[in-house]
Image (cartoon, helix red, strand yellow):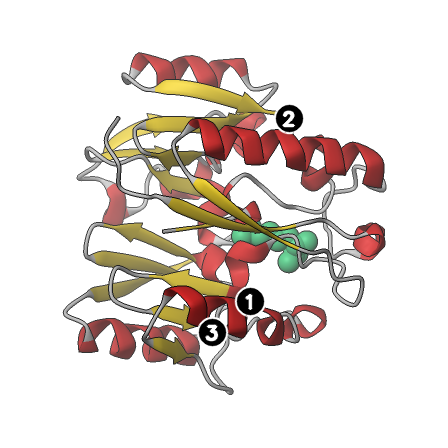
Amino acid sequence: MILKFSRAIVRMPCRNMINGLTTANLGLPDYIKAIGQHGDYIHALENCGLEVLTLPADEKFPDSTFIEDIALFTPHCAVVTNPGAPSRNGEISLIKETLSDFFSRIEKIHSPGTLEAGDVMMVEDHYYIGLSERTNEEGARQLIEILNNYGLNGSVIKLEKVLHLKTGVSYLERNNLAACGEFLIHPEFQNYNLIEIDDDESYAANCLWINDKVLVPAGFPKTKKRISDAGYFTIEVDLSEFRKLDGGLSCLSLRF
Ligand code: CIR
């Protein structure tokens, strides 16, 4: 197994997740079902060789299980973000102590900059940053400055329709990029081997490479086949309850 990541951090969903932010129109999530799906997700991470730290649920923050958005990990430092969604901003206070157990250097995005790490896609030393309703130009500027200080670099991608950059595009290493909609024709991505995700399976564009296996959401057979055909072992995970809150595979963990 190619080991790039060895650990992941997840946060248990809370009962209050039914009050999470959403545009999905798929009904309210079922908490009990979500707990089961979250357990399966953790097993999938373990199957990819990761040691998983599971943080407790926090009822104050309905969306706090989507832990990816509040921190970005680079090989040299962790960056605590500054979520643009007001109901999510307080989530950052929950993570700081945990991060200091793993990272000696912790950076921070400051207001008026906003940034959610679902908008950040890492390709080797380069970090694409989506400008979205949650991540603004000042947040992106601050992140690029931080990255530059560690010999890394970044560039911005203006989003048209999706919530976060990684809602619509996922880097699967070896120059392979799973992409749908606006990203298939985006000039920045034309030098990658594009794995096209059809519009009717766009939820599956948020798939997750971990140590040369790829997690894909269950129920998207065309996407699963295209990713398998690209040479990856795929693991399906049913995330129906998180999808009701616009949450995908990557949002549920921090990997490093
Ligand atoms: C939100 O709207 O913030 C949550 N309901 C979903 C966050 C999904 N996170 C992600 O795409 N990185």
In the rendered image, which residue does mark 1 sit on? 134
Amino acid under disc 1: Arg
Q: Amino acid at mark 2?
A: Asp
Q: Which mark is residue 254?
A: none
Q: Quadrant of the N terminus?
A: top left
Crowd rating for badge 2 (residues with CA inside 10 Å; few <14, some 14–19, many 20+): some
| Residue 68 picture location, percent across and down | 51, 55
49 relative to 89, above or below: above
- In what element is the residue under mark 3? loop
Across and down, in percent, residue 160 comes to: 49, 54
**Disc 2 designates what residue?**
238
Dot 2 lies on which element?
loop
Ligand 1 closer than 8 Å to the CB at disc 1?
A: yes
Checking the image for residue 136, the label placed there is 3
Whether tag 3 and tag 1 are in contact, CB under 8 A, the answer is no
In which image quadrant can residue 59 be found? bottom right
